[in-house]
């Protein structure tokens, strides 16, 4: 993947020199198990002066104004769906720098004097982006916002004067389902709006049928050594398509069983017959064409794009044949593993990659078919341990596949407040070792949650020795929410955002802070949920009634009733009289005025 | 306002009504008579009384001023008269009782009649300019109500309803509005004017209109009214006010006569009668019941009644009136609403996989898994394996699970559903079609992109231990020394379907097995979904509880229910799905049966449909019932309906225990013979007996502790030792009560009271355990409750050895060991060692708690009961406090 990046940089570097403002490129890379990675990259920039003067040309005005309003210097927005299967597909595209965890992820550097002001601007930003991208970004409130300390470094060049006042805020919405309504505004930001060029291939049906897809928007200032600083926006869409699935026609997407004679069978089995077939179709890579997998042809190139950047590249061994439409020029890369295509501005482009012919029965056919994916620097898998509604645990399995280099990385968790983690239970141990290895966790940054105010933020700097697997575990307690805090689908569980793993550059002097990023999958945490149904209410009422009745019953059972004449000397009558006197005394008063006179008369009489 | 206590008490007996009528004071009677007379006269058409006496505004002149006084006595019809009399009499009587007859006479013929009439006339004639005639005593009713309301207001200013304070003086207004709204042709204005005067009077502005005290007294004394007129309320009596007649300690009212005839003044109304009522209620009522010796004779019958009702209740459940049709509660499931496409060329694949798996039969677990893993990997799924080893009854159960995860194409590993197939089913048959079917389904499911949850395919070597190990490890509840952790995991499990398809050839129906470990059940929605998909969409038969034919009549329903209860009560795992249920993962096993025309693909489509339904779930299954008894595939009873049955059976023990406790605190018979039965004669020291608690508590505790012995023995003996152990234990079990009893009588010589207490404590524990258990495992609680029911009626037979040994042998017939032997006799093919081995296996692997209930709940109670039966209580002098 780094190769790809360097390859791209070949074109990016002259970009600055020519001050060309826009380029777009699609890189296709077949992956094992008949999948295809398609990476769309669109990049444009605007000089600071033009930006200040609201002279937006290729930079999307809608986004630019939001950034100005919220004093945002650098912005990263991710919409992701699915998971990257690192075991099969290898390292992530862009070294993981252009992807987020499931749902929506947003982090930005804002300029603000104080934390409160930063929060206010952050709120402005999220609300505005929410409207722009039709996503529930406005739900990124204080409880979902953190300020990472170690994990993120600005990608752009920020003048030193402003760094003191810039605040990094990070928010994530793991429950947000990314869909077409997010793609449309995304395409609208492009200069060619998806009408022409590689963006014509972006179709909601195909994109959201992908096994994994990630849409990214990165806005960052860039200051070349000479010349004016520019604000650069980079939009990226990566998706992994299942070739089988994508090739299904759109009007008939149901995977009906194919007719018996179309099944690809292993004829070497002794039981093979017309009605018995050991299938072999998943073992081989599929042939595909651009129009098959994207459902349409690519319509020319965007006239605004830098003509020096070839719009379509294919990473496939040189040995394989590829057919294109007339007018497209194929340029093979010297490394023998990729080729690019120059396309005329108005031609419809089609690319056909036929199945690799097996000319000889060579054992390493599989190697020849596709470029072998690079091994990622780290594998990470996170899952819940334990069961029940009271406590739980989180276990992350981190594996360093490299036989000789150790990996240093920052592991960041943003947990909702209702998962109260027990920090003392954090434990990292190397598989095989019995005790815990204290040297694994080198630095911990922990900001505890405050109920209903903010979530837990946990950042660990860890170092994993070569060829070893580390189990990072911790326990947590599930808190009970208030009745009204449950969402309508309370029994579904609560999504916990992906952990962000940032692998640090081994040589600290390097320009890049991180060499590789990856996210774990998100988790679904089930909290103790009250039964919101009618029977529950009935039970509550019945229990209350029984409790009340029990009080009375118990009273009658244990109290000794004593009748008035059985009681002590004072007598019930006197007590009742006293009590009634206290209760009804006013009546005596009411009648009293007359009565008093009478009493007096009575006395007189007596007297 | 009439006191509710009084009217209630009065209504209790006709005599009260009569006495009340007898005590009505003079003026009230006069008014009553006047109203009745006027009504009777009104029946004569010639007189046209209503026209003569009513208050008609236009007709009121100097000569017709009599109308101002007569209109309250004239009524429209009988109903009007009766209602007004009923409302007026209590109020008027009270008023008269307080102010005296003469004052009432003066007021009611003076201002109380004329003032409202004037107000009414003024408003009607000059303000409204209308001419509506009014009549009837209701104007007085409202007047008196107004007076009363003001008084109440002074004492009790606010009526608090929620957060609102409602002034109490408004209550007559509320009544006024009600009457105006509800009673046709009632005069709102007339009532209002009456009420206004009432308020004025209540506030004290009208008391100057009352005749002077002196004059009245003069008249009274001169005419000797008190002596001449019956029921006359004199001025002197009225000074008692309303409450001046309470009994003093000097003159206790005679309790026998409810009516205070001794007093002349009828103002005694509130005094003695109410007091008497209270008095009889407190002393003679409750205390008499409490001290009634018959009360202590009741509990055995009550207990028997509880048991009988509990059993009858159970047998009523299959009736249509008590059971319900099942229904889908979770709307997201939408069972049977999708087309299923599994079939066609998938059958070719299925045949190939069947050949492949058929070739693995007889090989070792590892080889089988190797073979299966190749197939699963070729489908493109990630696989992993898990080793497990369990030890139980001297046997080692070990194996290796193989599982594969189909990652939801667009999901993110937060939720998963499981498809399980064991290599061998519960009966030990090779799951011939089940294994290839889940492989084919895995391949088929892989093609769909619509899965929102991961699908886990699990193949286990056996049906109980393998799934248990896997589920335990999935939830990190496993013992890692015996069961490996899972290297590959997905999200929270939302449901599981197990396939048990050992049958060769085409089948007719699907059998749904749903019993979980310890009688836990999956959510009813899952069963209903499978039922609706298999039965409704696919047109297969569906059966439960091995009822291969079910005619939906009472006997079949009852049989299904009882089978289900027996399985639930035993709490054994009934299939691969059972292990999932304790982790709140709803699961069922599907078994094809019968000979029909459905093929393997049909079974696959049932699974496909069910998975599509589960895939729709947004929330974990929670809507429908978790506690139910199924009696047909579409009929069930829910916990609310069936629970009373077990609860009643459990309650019978508690009732008996409480009764025995009370009884043990009472002096023995000869002490009770003393004649002081009447508790109200001022002898407060009812004799209480000191309870000797040490021995009973000790015996019950000992029994409870002894229970550990069989529990340990049967769960730790090796298989070969199980039958001998059981035989020895059964013999010892028979002899132990005799030995213990002999020891007790020899060295401790317990008294009757101590035997009562032993029984009381043991039954108390039993009742408590069983009623708690009934909420967890209804069937087990009911079965144990019924088997232990004879214990309620056991008592020592000091004089009759024959009865003693009869009861002892009866108890031995329902002992836990005997029950086990009877079970082996009834179900042929079962022997003691199989049952005990199964129990030990379930205890060790699945955590089944039935042995705990049998040995630690039932057995100690049985032992204590046997001791009581065999007891020979010694008569000793009881200490009295």
Image (spheres, rainbow, N blue to C red):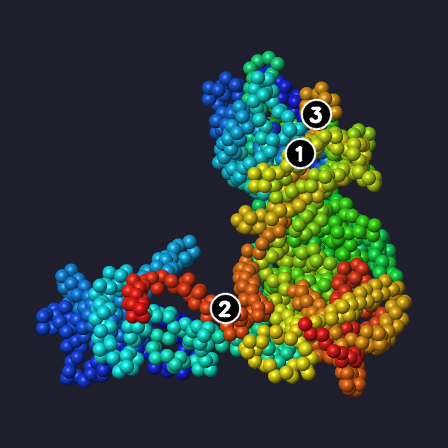
Judged left or right of residue B435, residue B719 is right
User: Do marks 2 and 1 both belong to one polypeptide chain?
Assistant: yes
- The residue carrying pointer 1 sits among few (fewer than 14), some (14 to 19) or many (20 or more) residues within 10 Å by Cα, namely some
**Which marked residue is nearer to the observer: mark 3 or mark 1?**
1
Answer whether residue B878 is visible to the viewer in this image.
yes
User: Do marks 3 and 1 both belong to one polypeptide chain?
Assistant: yes
Mark drawn on residue A333: 3
Q: Secondary structure at mark 2?
A: loop
The reply to whether discs 2 and 1 touch (Cβ–Cβ < 8 Å) is no
Residue picked out by circle 2: A570
Residue picked out by circle 1: A446
x and y, in percent, of residue B277 in the image: 46, 76
What chain is tagged by disc 1?
A
Residue at x 13% of width, y 61% of height: B126
The reply to whether discs 3 and 1 touch (Cβ–Cβ < 8 Å) is no
Alpha-carbon distance for marks 3 and 2? 114 Å
Front-most of B232 and B203? B232
- The residue carrying pointer 2 sits among few (fewer than 14), some (14 to 19) or many (20 or more) residues within 10 Å by Cα, namely few
Judged left or right of residue B227, residue B816 is right
What chain is tagged by disc 2?
A
């Amino acid at each position: 993947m780094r190769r790809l990046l360097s390859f791209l940089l070949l074109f990016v570097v002259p970009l600055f020199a020519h001050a060309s403002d826009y380029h777009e490129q699609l890189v296709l890379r077949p992956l094992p198990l008949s999948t295809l990675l398609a990476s769309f990259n669109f990049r444009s920039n605007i000089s600071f002066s033009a930006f200040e003067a609201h002279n937006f040309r290729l930079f999307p005005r809608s986004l630019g104004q939001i950034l100005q309003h919220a004093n945002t210097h650098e912005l990263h927005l991710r919409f992701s769906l699915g998971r990257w299967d690192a075991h099969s597909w290898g390292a992530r595209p862009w070294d993981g720098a252009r992807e987020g965890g499931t749902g929506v992820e947003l982090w930005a550097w804002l300029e603000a004097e104080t934390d409160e002001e930063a929060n206010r601007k952050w709120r402005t930003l999220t609300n505005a982006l929410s409207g722009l991208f039709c996503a529930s970004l406005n739900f990124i409130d204080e409880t979902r916002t953190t300020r990472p300390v170690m994990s993120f470094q600005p990608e752009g060049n920020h003048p030193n004067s402003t760094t003191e006042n810039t605040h990094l805020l990070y928010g994530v919405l793991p429950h947000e389902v990314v869909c077409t309504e997010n793609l449309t505004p995304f395409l609208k930001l492009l200069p060619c709006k998806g009408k022409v060029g590689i963006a014509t291939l972006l179709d909601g049906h195909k994109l959201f049928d992908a096994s994994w897809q990630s849409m990214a928007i990165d806005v960052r200032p860039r200051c070349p050594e000479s010349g004016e600083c520019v604000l650069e926006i980079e939009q990226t869409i990566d998706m992994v398509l299942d070739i089988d699935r994508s090739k299904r026609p759109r009007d008939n997407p149901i995977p009906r069983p194919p007719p018996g004679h179309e099944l690809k069978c292993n004829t070497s089995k002794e039981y093979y017959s017309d009605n018995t077939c050991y299938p072999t179709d998943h073992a081989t890579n599929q042939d595909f064409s651009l129009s098959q997998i994207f459902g349409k042809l690519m319509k020319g190139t965007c006239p605004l794009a830098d003509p020096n950047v070839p719009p379509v590249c294919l990473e496939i061994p040189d040995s394989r044949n590829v057919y294109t439409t007339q007018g497209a020029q194929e340029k093979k890369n010297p490394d023998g593993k990729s080729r690019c295509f120059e396309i005329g501005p108005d031609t419809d482009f089609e690319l056909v990659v036929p199945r690799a012919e097996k000319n000889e029965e060579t054992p390493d056919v599989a190697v020849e078919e596709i470029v072998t994916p690079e091994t990622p620097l780290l594998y990470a898998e996170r899952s819940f341990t334990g069961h029940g509604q009271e406590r739980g645990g989180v276990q992350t399995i981190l594996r360093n596949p490299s036989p000789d280099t150790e990996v240093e990385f920052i592991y960041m968790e943003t947990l909702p407040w209702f998962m109260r983690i027990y920090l003392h239970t954090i434990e990292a141990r190397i598989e095989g070792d019995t005790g815990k290895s204290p040297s694994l966790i080198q630095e911990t940054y922990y900001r505890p949650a405050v109920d209903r105010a903010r979530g837990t933020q946990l950042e660990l700097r860890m170092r994993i020795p070569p060829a070893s697997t580390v189990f990072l575990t911790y326990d947590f307690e599930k808190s009970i929410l208030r009745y009204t805090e449950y969402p309508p689908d309370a029994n579904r569980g609560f999504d916990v955002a992906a952990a962000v793993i940032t692998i640090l550059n081994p040589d600290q002097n390097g320009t890049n802070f991180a060499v590789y990023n990856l996210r774990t999958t998100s988790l679904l945490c089930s909290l103790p949920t009250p039964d919101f149904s009618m029977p529950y209410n009935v039970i509550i009422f019945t229990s209350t009634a029984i409790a009340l009745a029990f009080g009375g019953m118990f009273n009658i059972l244990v109290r000794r009733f004593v009748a008035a004449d059985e009681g002590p000397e004072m007598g019930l009558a006197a007590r009742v009289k006293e009590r009634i006197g206290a209760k009804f005394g006013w009546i005596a008063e009411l009648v009293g005025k007359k009565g008093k006179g009478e009493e007096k008369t009575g006395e007189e009489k007596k007297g | 306002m009439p006191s509710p206590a009084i009217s209630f008490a009065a209504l209790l007996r006709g005599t009260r009504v009569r006495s009340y009528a007898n005590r009505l004071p003079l003026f009230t009677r006069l008014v009553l008579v006047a109203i009745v007379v006027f009504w009777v006269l009104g029946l004569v058409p010639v007189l046209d009384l209503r026209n003569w006496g009513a208050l008609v505004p236009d007709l009121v002149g100097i000569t017709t001023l009599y109308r101002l006084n007569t209109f309250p006595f004239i009524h429209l019809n009988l109903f009007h008269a009766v209602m007004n009399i009923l409302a007026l009499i209590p109020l008027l009587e009270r008023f008269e009782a307080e102010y005296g007859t003469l004052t009432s006479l003066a007021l009611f013929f003076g201002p109380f009649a004329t003032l409202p009439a004037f107000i009414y006339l003024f408003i009607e004639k000059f303000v409204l300019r209308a001419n509506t005639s009014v009549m009837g005593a209701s104007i007085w009713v409202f007047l008196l109500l107004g007076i009363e309301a003001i008084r109440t207001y002074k004492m009790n200013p606010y009526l608090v309803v929620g957060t609102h304070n409602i002034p109490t003086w408004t209550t007559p207004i509320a009544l006024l509005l009600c009457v105006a709204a509800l009673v046709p042709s009632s005069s709102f204005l007339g009532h209002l004017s009456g009420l206004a005067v009432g308020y004025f009077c209540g506030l004290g502005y009208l008391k100057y209109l009352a005749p002077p005290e002196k004059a009245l007294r003069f008249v009274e004394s001169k005419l000797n009214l008190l002596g001449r007129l019956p029921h006359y309320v004199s001025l002197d009596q009225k000074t008692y006010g309303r409450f001046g007649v309470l009994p003093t300690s000097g003159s206790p009212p005679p309790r026998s006569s409810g009516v205070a005839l001794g007093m002349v003044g009828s103002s005694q109304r509130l005094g003695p009668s109410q007091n008497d009522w209270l008095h009889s209620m407190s002393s003679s009522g409750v205390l008499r019941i409490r001290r009634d010796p018959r009360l202590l004779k009741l509990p055995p019958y009550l207990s028997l009644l509880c048991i009988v009702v509990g059993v009858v209740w159970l047998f009523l459940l299959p009736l249509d009136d008590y059971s319900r049709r099942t229904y889908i509660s979770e709307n997201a499931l939408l069972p049977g609403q999708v087309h299923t496409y599994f079939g066609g060329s998938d059958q070719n694949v299925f045949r190939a996989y069947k050949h492949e798996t058929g070739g693995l039969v007889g090989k070792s677990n590892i080889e089988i898994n190797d073979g299966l893993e190749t197939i699963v990997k070729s489908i493109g799924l990630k696989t992993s394996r898990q080793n497990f080893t369990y030890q139980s009854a001297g046997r080692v159960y070990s194996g290796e699970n193989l599982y594969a995860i189909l990652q939801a194409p667009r999901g993110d590993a937060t939720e998963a559903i499981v498809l399980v197939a064991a290599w061998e089913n519960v009966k030990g048959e090779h799951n011939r079609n089940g294994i290839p079917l889940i492989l084919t389904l895995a391949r088929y499911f892989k093609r769909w992109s619509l899965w929102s949850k991961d699908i886990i395919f699990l193949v286990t070597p056996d049906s109980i231990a393998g799934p248990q190990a896997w589920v335990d490890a999935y939830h990190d509840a496993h013992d890692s020394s015996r069961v490996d952790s899972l290297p590959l995991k997905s999200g929270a499990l939302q449901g599981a379907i197990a396939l048990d398809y050992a049958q060769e050839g085409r089948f007719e129906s699907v059998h749904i097995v749903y019993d979980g470990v310890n009688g836990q059940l999956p959510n009813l929605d899952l069963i209903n979904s499978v039922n609706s998909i298999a039965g409704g969409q696919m047109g297969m038969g569906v059966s439960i509880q091995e009822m291969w034919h079910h005619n939906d009549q009472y006997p079949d329903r009852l049989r299904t229910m009882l089978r289900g209860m027996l399985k639930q009560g035993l709490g054994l795992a009934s299939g691969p799905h059972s292990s999932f249920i304790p982790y709140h993962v709803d699961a069922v096993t599907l078994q094809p049966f019968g000979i029909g025309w459905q093929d393997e693909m049909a079974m696959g489509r049932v699974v496909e449909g069910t998975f599509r339904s589960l895939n729709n779930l947004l929330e974990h299954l929670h809507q429908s019932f978790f506690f139910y008894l199924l009696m047909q595939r579409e009929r069930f009873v829910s916990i609310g309906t069936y629970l009373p049955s077990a609860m009643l059976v459990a309650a019978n023990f508690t009732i008996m225990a409480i009764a025995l406790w009370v009884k043990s605190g009472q002096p023995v018979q000869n002490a009770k013979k003393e004649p002081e039965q009447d508790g109200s004669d001022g002898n407060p020291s009812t004799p209480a007996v000191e309870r000797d608690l040490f021995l009973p508590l000790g015996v019950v505790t000992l029994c409870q502790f002894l229970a550990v012995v069989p529990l340990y023995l049967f769960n730790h003996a090796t298989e070969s030792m199980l039958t001998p152990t059981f035989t020895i234990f059964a013999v010892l079990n028979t002899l132990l009560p005799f030995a213990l009893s002999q020891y007790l009588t020899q060295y401790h010589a317990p008294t009757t009271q101590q035997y009562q207490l032993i029984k009381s404590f043991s039954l108390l524990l039993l009742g408590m355990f069983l009623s708690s258990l009934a909420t967890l495992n209804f069937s087990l609680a009911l079965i144990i409750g019924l088997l232990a029911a004879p214990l309620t009626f056991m008592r020592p037979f000091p004089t009759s050895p024959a009865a003693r040994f009869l009861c002892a042998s009866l108890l031995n017939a329902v002992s836990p060991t005997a029950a086990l032997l009877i079970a082996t006799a009834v179900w042929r093919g079962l022997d003691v060692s199989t049952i005990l081995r199964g129990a030990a296996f379930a205890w060790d692997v699945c955590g089944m708690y039935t042995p705990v209930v049998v040995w630690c709940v039932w057995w100690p109670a049985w032992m204590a009961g046997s001791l009581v039966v065999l007891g020979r209580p010694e008569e000793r002098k009881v200490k009295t406090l």
